[in-house]
Structures are given as C-alpha cells and as structure tokens.
Amino acid sequence: MTSVLSTSGLFAAPGPGLPEHRATFGPLPVADPVQLTAAAELTGRGGAGFPTAVKLRSVAAAAAAGRRAPVLIGNGAEGEPASAKDAVLLSRAPHLVLDGLAVLARALGAADVVLAAPARLLPGLAARLAERSDGAAVRLHPTGDGFLAGEESALVAAVEGADPLPRSKLVPIRERGVGGRPTLVQNVETLARLALLARGDREAAGRTLVTRRSQVNHAGRTDVVDMPLGTPLGEVLRVDGAVRAVLVGGYHGTWLPAAVAGELPLDRAGLEPVGATLGAGVLAALPTDRCGLRETARVVGYLAASSAGQCGPCLNGLPRIAAALQVLARREAPPPQLLTDLWRWCGLLPDRGACRHPDGTVRLVASALGVFGPELRLHASGRCSATTARPFLPVAGAGR
Amino acid sequence: MTRLAVDPITCTGHGLCAELLPEAIALDEWGYPLLAHGELPKQLLRRARSVAATCPTRALRLVQTPARSAATEA
C-alpha cells in the first residue's frame, strides 16, 4: 500500500471530505489563474514541466480567436506503474483538485469540464463531487491503465469516446482538441497547487509530490511525499551503500549512479547538468542486490508493449531495443554487433513519433547503458553482480 | 521559414518522398522518412510541394516553423 508522510501542504486536511477541506483551507477565493501561475512560475506536474501560465494563455487565445469555449480536462490517469502520487492526491485531497478545476473553468468559460481518472477512483470522486454546489459541472471519465492513458492527446481521444491513443500534434490540442474545441489538459497535482495559490499559499508552486520506491527490510516500499523543489535527492530518498543506482523521473527518466545522485538538488536546474528531469516525480533506489540491466530490460519490455503501434519508428524500434536489452541482461557475451545496433536504433527514435513515448524510452535505455556499463562487462564474461532476480520496479501485467 | 513535417501516424512508409526528394528526405532502415532539419532551401520549395501532394497517405507536408515551437511539449 502507498503511504503518505506529509501532514502539511497538499495533505494538510485530516480527511478527504468537504467539511475537513473547508476547515483546513478556507473558502476558495475568486482568482485569476493566469496571473497566479505566472507570478508563482507554476509548472505542470504531469511530467513535461511546462509553464502553466503559458498553456493557459494559449488555450484562452485559441478560444478567443475561434470564438469557441474551451474544454477543460483534469488529468489523473497516471499510466506510469511506478507513480502513485496522483491517485494518492485524488484519494486524500480531492477537493483541492476540484477547486483547481473550478478556478480554471470559471476563468476560461469552459464549455465542458472533465476529470479523468482510473475507474477504481471514480466512486470516491463522485461522492466528493456530490458534496459541492459546483459539483454537477464536472464530468468524471474513466481512464484505462495503459502507460499512455495519460498522454494528453490520448486523453482527448478517450474523452471523445475513441480508442485512447495518441494523436498527431501538427495541430496542438490547445487549438483543436475535444470535439474540435481548444482543450486544456492539466495534471491533477497542478490543479491542486493552483487551488493553494488561489488561497495565497506562496509555497505551493515551490513544492512537488514525489513517489519514492526503495527497499526496506528486503521488501520494496512505495510512498508519496510533498517536498520543496531543490531538496537534495539524498534527503528525500535514502542513498547509502545498499543502493546501486537511482532512477529519476520514472520510466521515461534517467538512471544515475548512487555516488552522484545523493547530492543533486531535485529541480530543473539541479538535474539538468546530469541530463535528468524530475518528470512526474518518480524516484527509485535500486538495491545493490538487483541487476540494473535486468530491471531496465523488464521495464523496457513493458514500455515496448505499451507502444500504441501507430508510428513506424516506434513500432519498429522499441521491440528491437527491448529484445536487445533482454540479451544484454543475460550472463553471456552478446552478439558482436548488438550494442552498435542498439545505439543506432536509439538514435533513430527521438522526435519522430506523435507522442514522446519513444523519446522517453530511449532516454532510459541510454542512461542504463552508461550507468550499468560495468555490469555489461561482467555479463559479457558470464557473471552478474546481483544476488537476486526478484523484480524491483513495478510493471503492469498487460500492455495498453 | 518553411520546413518539411511528417504526420508519423498517417505515414506508412511508402518511401515515395525519399525517391522524389533525396536532397531533403532519406529513409531509415525500416523505410520511414528521415527529414532534413531546418529550413527547406528555396530552390527545393516547389518540388517539395509537389512531392507532398503525391504522398500516398498525405502524411508529408510543408509547415511554417513558428507554428511548432512550444506546442510540441505537453
């Protein structure tokens, strides 16, 4: 089970109900979200870290130019198996998310307001909506559990009743999304932070939710914390002699050697020098008893199976990359050309898909080949430094 | 500034574009187009337009660059 340690910030209310929410945070003031998010420099918490104010302005501009009221979607799909923060937020502090939607819906004059989340969370959310006078304005939409379910154009497709697959971005959904209307998709944590900003909480944009995975007493443990951006990684995640490497940013993220990871400030500027980003806030400390190549091969197998299979480079490249990693994860010398092929395939994928799935997968693979270089050499000589094959990183059973 | 763009979902790798406009389009090992980065040279513009028009799936197009920018990041 995922536990939460914080009792402040987003999780300050003692329960998920409206009375606790009101007692903790007070009423929701009327607020200008563009001004608030611009002043606080709030960035999206779905993974890309895009400035929220810029997104809001472009949707508002598209709506004004086309004289069409926009559609607003709160994104709680959280397709990444290693991430739990959105589900925890929707369970623990749903009214902050709904407040954020209300602020945006009012400011944008939204024609349709949708909260998209995994089906298992919808009954609870329906009960929370029923507590609110503005609850009837929000439509709940179930999302699938596939990795790409939260990709914003896939979400638009799902809300339209089509298969939840990414779409071409030649015309961005900010201009033409659900039903052809300008569409704003915001991660649920971004919405909750906006709700705190609206109440004058200046720290709200300077904190972020993180899903941490580590090994405690020989068992994997996952929890969620609300931490200040810029905190050294080692203060959020225990990086000691029992940790081999740290995965930063989830399955589209970057492996870092344990020796480097601990000191890094967890924000954009702090992670940039090592080629990493916080993504949707997943941190995982790989224990020394596991093999980083084996773990990466399993995750990349899952990611390849999660491809929508719509774009040629991804359709052809990811299965080959996944198969190559499976060979490299074995304790045997790989075919002589394999690493050369693997690097070439990795070079062929970025910037060529409708979504960033191939780009993110290649980022993970490239970092694994670097950080687990010594392990590659061990494998080639028939050895492996791991002592157990037990999986550490979670992957969902099926693909999309 | 005008550049080439491909809708990767619509493209099914016929490869016609690379045959007709080898100056700006190559094929990867699976038969999908690799587009030259940056601005399309002026002398190629007319031919590029007609090549885009002959793409069997209408996946190839010419776009004005400022339209892209931040919009590709979600």
Image (cartoon, coloured by chain):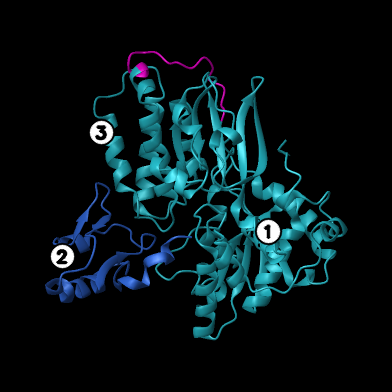
**Residue closest to the eye, A369 or A194:** A194
Residue density around tag 1, few if under 14, some if 14–19, many if 20 or more, within 10 Å:
many
In the image, residue B65 lies at what x, y percent? 31, 71
- Mark 2 — on which chain does it sit? B
Badge 1 or badge 3: first in the primary sequence = 1
Residue at point 64%, 62% (across, down) = A74
Task: Label the blue chain with its letter.
Answer: B
- Mark 3 — on which chain does it sit? A
In the image, residue A160 lies at what x, y percent? 59, 68
Label ID, residue B20: 2
Task: Name the kind of residue labelled 1 in the image.
Answer: Ala
Query: Does the stretch in magenta take in A381?
Result: yes
Residue designated by label 3? A340
Residue A111: quarter of image:
bottom right
- Mark 1 — on which chain does it sit? A
Task: Label the cyan chain with its letter.
Answer: A
Task: Name the kind of residue labelled 3 in the image.
Answer: Thr
Query: Does the stretch in magenta take in B57?
Result: no
Residue designated by label 1? A192
Give the main secondary structure, helix, strand or loop, of the magenta stretch: loop
Q: Are marks 3 and 2 in contact (CB under 8 Å)?
A: no
Residue at point 51%, 20% (across, down) = A288
Distance from the alpha carbon under mark 2 to that under mark 1? 52 Å
Q: Which residues are magenta?
A: A378-392
User: SS of the residue at dot 3?
Assistant: helix
Q: Are marks 2 and 1 in contact (CB under 8 Å)?
A: no
